[in-house]
Amino acid sequence: MSDTDIVVLRRGVHGRPASEYVSALCDRLPDRTVRRAETPAAERSLVADAPIVTGVAMDESLLSAAESLELFACLYAGVGHLPLDAFERRNVAVTNAAGVHGPKIAEYVLGALLTFTQGFHRGIQRARDREWRHFQTRELQGSTVTVVGLGAIGTAVLDRLAPFDIETVGVRYTPSKGGQAKAVYGFDAIHEACAGTDFLVLACPLTDRTEGLVDEALLETLPPEAVLVNIARGPVVETPALVRALQGNQLRGAVLDVTDPEPLPEGHPLWTLSNVVMTPHNAGDTPQYYERVADILATNVERLDSGEQLQNRAV
């Protein structure tokens, strides 16, 4: 029998040390033994008898060493990088961090929309150039925002937009489920959802259906004064088509937390466009990250003991 209940793998998230995650788990689970593996050798040793392992990734080699494993709690919302078939063959449950990013990414989107309505990006550039010259701005009130993907992140975005007196449009796989948007479309009606929008916010997972969703045809449907905000995944947007639209005044601007390719090569044209704001895939970074994933795992420790359905179960 193992003297370790939960093993935390050594790799942290967003540059934050995994030791902070260990502390958050110990606070919530004082009766459980939580140990962090600090080396590859320690990982293989500790997972051998532990019923629960948590971290960013667990490959098949490490999984094969985990003879008593019941649950792998992934620290990412997406689990496509994991050997899910291998977990399923071993009858090991896999959970994800869905919902953890919602509050922070929603604030990022709000900041992106306000950046382009208030012209902050233009003001910053003119200040760098020591140029005191006025420019026209806009109001967020009265605009239309289309949110593609109405999961935890898309819903959090709509929550934060509610006080601004704007028209909201949602796009989801099953529009009959509705949502907080005033109008909800399916992906087969993406052009109708985008035809009159001022801001297109991508908050959907990367799937066969969403890869290349924002292509040349959809960019032509968008009004030329629209702004694209991508906090989904880079390949949801066809990058060459986006560059052409931005260079040809077919699109007012873009705020990109993700790109394709990622990271962008040094000579890529997106670096040089004044109507593009980019961040290095860190819209979800928050000092509350480990606190939130620890809440999920603490809940699932109890559910694992009682045989209840696990929160955020992916496998």
Image (tube, rainbow, N blue to C red):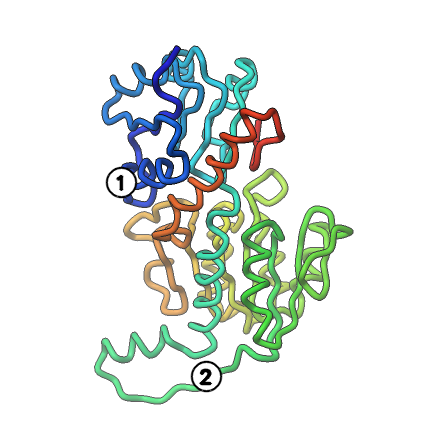
The image shows residue 216 at horizontal and vertical percentages of 58, 56
Q: Which mark is residue 17?
A: 1
**Element under label 1?**
loop
Q: Residue 156 sits in which quadrant?
A: bottom right
Amino acid of disc 2: Thr
Alpha carbons under labels 1 and 2: distance apart: 41 Å
| Residue at horizontal 41 percent and vertical 39 percent from the top | 28
| Residue at horizontal 54 percent and vertical 73 percent from the top | 225
Q: Is residue 272 left or right of residue 130?
A: right
| Residue at horizontal 62 percent and vertical 30 percent from the top | 309
- Examine the rendered structure and indicate whether residue 57 appears above or below residue 4: below
Q: Is residue 39 left or right of residue 9?
A: left
The image shows residue 11 at horizontal and vertical percentages of 30, 33
| Residue at horizontal 43 percent and vertical 79 percent from the top | 118
Q: List the residue tagged with mark 2.
A: 137
**Mark 1 neighbour class, 10 Å CA radius: few under 14, some 14 to 19, many 20 or more:** few
Total marks drawn? 2
